Amino acid sequence: MFTAFLYRHTCLLFCRWSLPMMMSIGHRGTGVAMSAGVSLFGLAALILPEQFPYYLAFVKSLSLGPALIYSAKFALAFPLTYHTWNGIRHLMWDMGKGFKIPQVYQSGVLVLVLTLLSSAGLAAM
């Protein structure tokens, strides 16, 4: 069983990972993570005994430092912005644009830069 898995997925072990490959995996991962996060947040809203303002006040009472709060906000904003920008990139591909290899790498770098800038901007709010 395990040898069959390794046979089918040898590229993951022995091939050089490219930017488009890593971004594709990241796009799927951020989609799954956001879906799980929204589901868990909704489930918590149904199960936990208090209303949201109570838990918000609890977090505020912890007196967390600004660096930790900014980091947490950045960590929440990053999957959303990455998935959004990479989704726009995929929509451009659906229109038949940007399929040449240099364009694929350029658009990948553009997505990463826009993700970092927009995540930092959202975290600063």
Image (cartoon, grey):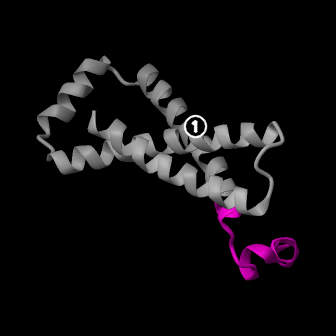
Callout 1, which amino acid?
A: Thr
The x, y position of residue 72, in whole percent, is: 32, 45
Q: Which residue position is annotated with label 1?
A: 84
Q: Is residue 10 magenta?
A: yes
**In the rendered image, the vertical position of residue 7 relative to residue 115, given as above or below:** below
**In the rendered image, the vertical position of residue 3 relative to residue 44, given as above or below:** below
Where are the magenta residues, as a range?
A: 1-22
Who's the residue at 50% across and 40% down the image?
Answer: 81
Towards the viewer: 12 or 38: 12
**On the rendered image, what quadrant is the C terminus found in?**
top left
Report the side of 40 relative to 61 (left or right).
right
Quick one: label 1, few (<14), some, or many (20+) residues within 10 Å? Answer: some
The x, y position of residue 123, in whole percent, is: 32, 40
- Main secondary structure of the magenta stretch: helix
Who's the residue at 18% across and 26% down the image?
Answer: 57
Who's the residue at 71% across and 56% down the image?
Answer: 103
Looking at the image, the residue that sits furthest to the bottom is 14
Who's the residue at 72% across and 62% down the image?
Answer: 102
Report the side of 48 relative to 9 (left or right).
left
The x, y position of residue 46, in whole percent, is: 45, 20
Q: Is residue 15 magenta?
A: yes
The x, y position of residue 110, in whole percent, is: 56, 52
